[in-house]
Amino acid sequence: MRLFAAVVPPAAALEDLDEFLAVRRDAGPFRWTLADHLHLTLAFLAEVPDRSLDELVERLGRAAGRRTAFATAIAGGGAFPNVARARVLWAGLDLDDAGRTELDRLATGARAAASKSGIEVEGRRFTPHLTVARLGRPQEVTRWVRLLDGYRGPAWSVDTLTLVQSHLGEGPSKRPRYEVIEEFPLAR
């Protein structure tokens, strides 16, 4: 199985971002992320054996229960690997110090839960972001990052960790289809 542990913003936050981007989509050479695919990946698990799923679910539940819910909003943006040669355009999160600490610890807990379940975790250093678009080849995107820097969506509470299965090529236009496997509440 191909899974990821994520924070999924509520529909109102995703709709607001989608409306902000909608009028701009024809102006850029991007492959835009579908609104219902927007999420904040905490741990990407490319190959999860069926036998490891129960232990992973148990460990993720414990990791989520150790974290406290916190407020945020989708705000700002950036590009990977950088604005001069971008392959990915992303939106960020507005977090105070306590929220940033909780999010970092939630990501660390999700990655540790996978590792302790015998699952390899992919990815580099954790940078909180929602991928809004991808480029077929590296391009300069400074004006797009500036545009995203002017965006701030409605506030919402991060109160759930979500385990999602990605079914490659089964969604619209050969994109992945996402299936929620389990949701884990954070402490209040």
Image (spheres, grey):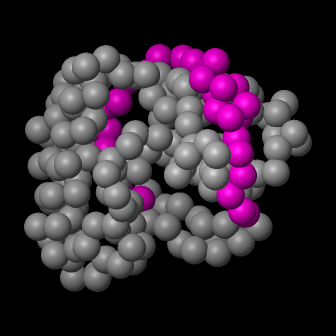
User: Residue 182, can we see it?
Assistant: no
Magenta segment, which residues?
136-164
At which x and y percent is residue 170? 64, 73
In reply to whether residue 139 is colored magenta, the answer given is yes
For the N terminus, which image quadrant? Answer: bottom left
Looking at the picture, does residue 127 appear above or below residue 178? Answer: above
**Identity of the residue drawn at 73% across and 31% down:** 143
**Identity of the residue drawn at 33% across and 47% down:** 126
Q: Residue furthest front?
A: 84
At which x and y percent is residue 80? 54, 49
Quarter residue 163 falls in: bottom left
**Identity of the residue drawn at 28% across and 28% down:** 100
Q: Is residue 101 toward the left or the right of residue 32 in the image?
A: left
Quarter residue 114 falls in: bottom left
Q: Is residue 70 toward the left or the right of residue 173 in the image?
A: left
Looking at the picture, does residue 29 appear above or below residue 91? Answer: below
In reply to whether residue 39 is colored magenta, the answer given is no
Q: Is residue 103 toward the left or the right of residue 86 in the image?
A: left
**Identity of the residue drawn at 22% across and 57% down:** 111
